[in-house]
């Protein structure tokens, strides 16, 4: 007998409370309802506040530690307060906590970064010395590398806060993931999408992961029909790459795998935090060798990086 959720015993879906996190949880619920022909009441959305949500006054890399957006959610999963957790995979550490597994992923959204500016159409059109806002270490390093003339200022907060800063002239442009904008129905605020050849995205950008307890047979059965296999293959290569480099969302590492027939094509990049140096590479391998592909490319890049490459200087 399959154990389907009922209004008396709904499947509890844990998420952060940000508008993007909620949109991702609703999308997950919508897909589960459609896949199983179940009513909305079979799924309960439970909002959890994380350290990353509480700390708004500092750049997150100064708070320290990994998983600033995931730890409290995982604790709720252990406690049984939630059954599955919906994550932006870009923010999920590569080392999985004991007893929890990423069951798989929803179909991946646009992987590109968005260029957002009231007055400038494209990244390449920014005038000499322009002030741009970003708190992402990856984007800052990539911009400093490509355009050493630009002035970088810290930009945190939600989309509205950032747009207000642009309106107030604090900076002439900023950057967000296209995926988040699309999921929020806000793609119109992107002035243009930045092609991946111009700015390689973060590992796992645009991918939503679904986590569950390793021994939860009901959650496993319910999630199975909504998981996207190609996204899983791409993420396997990208996350293996990231694991070797020991990075997280807050290190200057970029990586993107795409599928070409039965082959995975992985591009990767590491930068000095100040953008003064960039090491790139690419490799192809059969899909079945996704993890070896990721590790191999990471080793190749690390072999070219002098000691202290990731240190601040
Ligand atoms: N680090 C925050 C974060 N985590 C995931 C997304 C966007 C959505 C995604 O990549 O799936 C964002 C914001 C951003 O980079 O604009």
Image: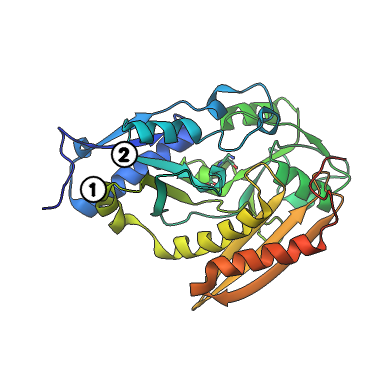
Residue 29 placement, left or right of 18? left
Question: Which disc is residue 83 wearing?
Answer: 2
How many marks are shown on the rendered structure? 2
Q: Residues within 10 Å of mark 1 (few under 14, many from 20)?
A: some
The image quadrant of residue 39 is top left
Q: Residue sitting at 57 percent across and 30 percent down? A: 158
Q: Nearer the viewer, residue 190 or 284?
A: 284
Q: Find residue 95 and report its horizontal and vertical position in percent.
A: 54, 48
* Numbered disc 1: secondary structure: helix
Q: Find residue 33 and report its horizontal and vertical position in percent.
A: 24, 47
The image quadrant of residue 127 is top right
Quick one: quadrant of the C terminus?
A: top right
The way the protein has been coloured in the rendering is rainbow
Dots 1 and 2: beta carbons under 8 Å?
Answer: yes
Q: Residues within 10 Å of mark 2 (few under 14, many from 20)?
A: many
Q: Is residue 291 positioned above or below 67 on the image?
A: below
Residue 305 placement, left or right of 45? right
């Amino acid at each position: 007998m399959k154990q389907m959720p009922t209004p008396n015993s709904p499947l509890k879906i844990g998420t952060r409370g940000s508008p993007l996190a909620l949109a991702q949880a609703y999308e997950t619920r919508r897909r589960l309802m459609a896949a199983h022909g179940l009513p909305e009441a079979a799924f309960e959305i439970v909002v959890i506040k994380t350290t990353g949500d509480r700390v708004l006054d500092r750049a997150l890399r100064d708070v320290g530690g990994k998983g600033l957006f995931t730890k409290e959610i995982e604790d709720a999963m252990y406690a049984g307060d939630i059954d599955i957790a919906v994550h932006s995979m870009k923010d999920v550490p590569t080392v999985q906590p004991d007893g929890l597994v990423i069951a798989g992923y929803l179909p991946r959204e646009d992987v590109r970064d968005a260029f957002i500016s009231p007055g400038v159409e494209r990244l390449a059109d920014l005038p000499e010395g322009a002030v741009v806002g970003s708190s992402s270490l990856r984007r800052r390093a990539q911009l400093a590398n490509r355009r050493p003339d630009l002035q970088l200022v810290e930009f945190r907060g939600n989309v509205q806060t950032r747009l207000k800063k642009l309106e107030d002239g604090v900076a002439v442009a900023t950057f967000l993931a296209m995926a988040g904008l699309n999921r929020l129905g806000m793609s119109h605020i992107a002035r243009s999408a930045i092609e991946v050849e111009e700015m390689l995205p973060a590992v796992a950008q645009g991918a939503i992961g679904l986590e569950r307890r390793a021994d939860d047979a009901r959650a496993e059965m319910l999630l199975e029909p909504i998981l996207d296999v190609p996204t899983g293959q791409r993420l396997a290569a990208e996350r293996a790459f990231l694991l070797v480099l020991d990075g997280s969302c807050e290190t200057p590492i970029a990586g993107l795998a795409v599928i070409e027939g039965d082959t995975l094509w992985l591009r990767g990049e590491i930068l000095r935090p100040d953008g003064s140096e960039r090491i790139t590479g690419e490799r192809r391998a059969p899909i079945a060798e996704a993890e070896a592909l990721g590790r191999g490319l990471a080793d190749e890049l690390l072999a070219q990086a002098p000691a202290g490459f990731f240190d601040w200087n």
